[in-house]
Amino acid sequence: MVVVNMCLLQYGGPFQSSDLRSENVKRFLTAMENMGLPTFQLSDLEVGSMKNVLECLLTLRSDFLSTSGDLQRSDSISQFGGEVHTRWKILGDCFKKKNNAHKDEANQGHSSFQRALRSPVMGEPSTALMQHVGHKFHEVFQLKNGRYADLPASKISEMMKSNSLDNAPTQSLLSVVNGILDESVERKNGEIPQRVALLLRKVVQEIERRISTQADHLKTQSNMFKAREEKYQSRIQVLEALAHAMSDDSENSTKEQQEQHHKAKIEDRRKAEEQDAAKVTPAKEDHSQEIADLKQELETARKAHEQRCLQMETEARAAQQVLQERLNEVEKLLTVSKSRVRDLEASSEQKSKGWNKKEHIYQIFTEFQLGALRELKFSTQSIKQEIVKTQKGYSEEFNTLGTRIKALQNAAESYYSLLSENQKLHNELQEFKGNIRVYCRVRPFITGQKESQTIVEYVGENGELIVVNPAKQGKESRRLFKFNKVYDQSATQVQVYSDTQPLIQSVLDGYSVCIFAYGQTGSGKTYTMTGPDRATEEEWGVNYRALNNLFAISQSRESTFHYDISVQMVEIYNEQVRDLLAADGSQKRLGILSTAKQNGLAVPDASMYPVRATSDVMHLMDVGLKNRAKGSTALNERSSRSHSIVSIHVRGVDQKTGSTMQSSLHLVDLAGSERVDRSEVTGDRLKEAQHINKSLSALGDVISALAQKSSHVPYRNSKLTQVLQSSLGGNAKTLMFVQLNPESNSYSESLSTLKFAERVSGVELGAAKSSKDGRDVRELMEQVASLKDAIAKKDEEIERLQLNMHHGGSADSSRYGPSSPRTPQRSMKLSSSSGGGEKAASDVEEENSESSDNHSDSVDSFRSQKDSLQQSKTTAGTGGIIETDGSPGSGHIRDKPKRPEITEKIRTTSRSPRTPDMSPRASPKISTGIRRSPSTTSLQPRPTPTWR
Ligand SMILES: Nc1ncnc2c1ncn2[C@@H]1O[C@H](COP(=O)(O)OP(=O)(O)OP(=O)(O)O)[C@@H](O)[C@H]1O
């Protein structure tokens, strides 16, 4: 329409006269009809109905263009003459102008609209336009082979030129975008080279720009349509106003009709325009829709691209960061390596300096060494000479040393000889004291008892004891007893044990020893043997102390002897032997072996535990004491109702010769010896008491038989004597503690106890002593004292020798003189003669026994004393009490003569018609003079302790 209007305006213009104009149109229409093209009515132009006009013109245009754009239809046009030709030419120019106008528009910023028209979205552009404008640029963007990523930079920069982009068809641009995106998708890592990305951005920007331009153009077109509509509306309004005005003129009906006709025409034109508008509107809507779709597509592509860009940026940043980190690391490594290199260089430099220094030092040192070697060679020669000299000196010294060692050996031998002699003397002393010894201990008053009621009137230092019968008056009421020792109420456990200790040494010398406590219930037997309940070390009884002492002596002899000590503990209750140390606490009855063999185990089935320290023994004793049978009697709340026997078995080995010995120590806590009627017991208790009294009576019989040297000793009369058989008689030493209750109401029991003890002791002293007997006793005491002194002297010498040996010094052997080559075990075989048990004498000697630890004088004095004693015994002609082992030249006393007066005394006492009454219930007898019990002279011969 615009083109037609323009042509028409060009053709006639509004300023031409209507006649001329109508004439021209008519000619045109005629030409159209001749050409066979559709025409329109002149009135159409007048009423403004452009539909037919447009159709006509468009058809003409198409026809015109199809004939190569020039107005060559001369065959048709020629019919219209030159004027018509001119008109067509004008029309053709008009179209050319229009095209030029289009070009101008493009140049002036409207070219985008044209490009939009050429794009596939907006419909295919005309071939002419394509050929004219975009063909060259289409080729630029066309990718013949390969991929965009592989395009050279020159090609991409050519593509990115604004001229290329501006002139390229949209189709080509979109294919570029799609191609790049497809490539990106195809690539595994999705990366796009930067230059391709830049191209993509440029292309997308171009497409965006074109779309926005197209949108603007459509907007403008829409506005144009609106403006035209408004124009037509205003025209309609004008025409309506005219029609209205003309209707008022009723007079001129023709005019009115004309006006009506004109109005109808206008109306038709309006309708036609409306139809045009209706036709254009869907196209406009389609365009809007397409624009929206394009925008959406573009937006999606843009977003994807942005996202991709962002992702790539992120990846690039991450990669950059990683690279940066690696770079930092490498830089650090480089720094460290550099510093190491520096260090190494420094250290190697230092080392090389050090090596240089060392080399220098070594050179000096080598030179020095060579010098020293020369000196050494020289000095070696001189040393050789010195060595020869020294060797000579050494050999001389060796000779001297040999002499000294010989002397030392002699001294050692003499030490052994003295040691054995000491043991022998110790044993002799013990024998002098008597192999059965009785110590009497008076129990103190227990809290609450009155001391005024005591029956003990006098306790002498030499073993005298005077008791008073509270029921009698005057001389008759007093009775004197004599024992080896009497302890008054104040005696401590230590004092009591000090006199027992020598016997313990005898055990380690191979003698069996039996220590037992005898006395009525509550008289202190358990106290003396064991100690009170929960005793402190001060209060320990004989048992603990004896064992302690045993361990101490065995340790002191460690260098020469090895001792194994083991313990058994049994009780005899109601004539049954029971194991107090049974691990399972069983109370089974044990059998007794007839102990024909010395030191054999009397109760082999009783548990035996080896002990190495006092603590072991204490533990065992605790166990044993807990298992011991106890009951309550009228006399003692916790009376021991059984005889308890702790048997310690010792096995010794002489480390030098390998010979062995065995001995045992029995520690016996006898049951109470009270009379049955006094303890007011019946039933089981009565039976217990009867068994106790019977066994004590049997013990008295055995001792009596031993004292009388009876051919038959009734060991088998009780379990007690059977168990103790090896410790009663023979070479055994026996110690009995007689426990005395000082209460006056116990006088009768106490007197029985004392009588029993008196018989065991074998010495019974009356109230008065003959002066002769007294003299005899004194003399014997003196002899014992001198013997003790001699022993002490020997001890000193032994100590001196030990000291010398320990210091390895050269003992002056000449001082001791050549000693006997006898060995200890040989000397231990030395014992008293079998027929020479001088009990009476030993009993008397005991008067001074507490001073046994005093030392005096020399060995020579001891020998002279011993010789005098020997001589006196020989004179008496009663046989020797000391015997040698029979080896010739041993220099030992083979025969020890008794002093005549002692022998005489023994004869007198042995001739006594008195029969020993060993019963605890024996009636008291008071003598006025010294009386000798037959037992004092008739103890069994004591065989030599045997080393096995
Ligand atoms: N020398 C003493 N010093 C202090 N207390 C003693 C002494 N002798 C005995 N006793 C005490 O006398 C009481 C009886 O002593 P112990 O039990 O030793 O008598 P026992 O003769 O063993 O009696 P049983 O035959 O009934 O066993 C105990 O309480 C004991 O502590």
Image (spheres, helix red, strand yellow):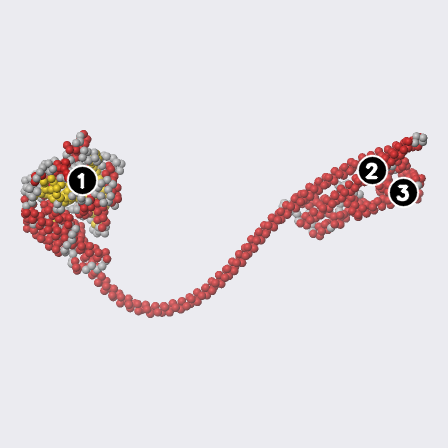
Q: Are marks 2 and 1 in contact (CB under 8 Å)?
A: no
User: What residue type is disc 2 on?
Assistant: Glu
Q: Are marks 3 and 2 in contact (CB under 8 Å)?
A: no
Number of residues whose C-alpha sits closer than 10 Å to that of mark 3, classed few (under 14), some (14–19) or many (20 or more)? few
Q: Residue at x 18, y 33 (%)?
A: 634
Query: In the shown orientation, is residue 772 left or right of residue 221?
Result: left
Mark 3 or mark 1, which has the lower sequence index?
3
Mark 2, secondary structure of its residue: helix
Q: Nearer the viewer, mark 3 or mark 1?
A: 1
Q: Looking at the picture, how far across and down is residue 164, in whole percent?
A: 75, 49
Residue 283 visible within the image: yes
Residue that label 1 marks: 445
If the picture is divided into quarters, which one holds ligand 1?
A: top left
Between marks 2 and 1, how big is the CA–CA gap?
157 Å
Number of residues whose C-alpha sits closer than 10 Å to that of mark 1, classed few (under 14), some (14–19) or many (20 or more)? some
Residue 230 got which mark?
2
Residue 78 got which mark?
none
Mark 2 or mark 1, which has the lower sequence index?
2
Residue 492 or residue 100, whichever sits in front: 492
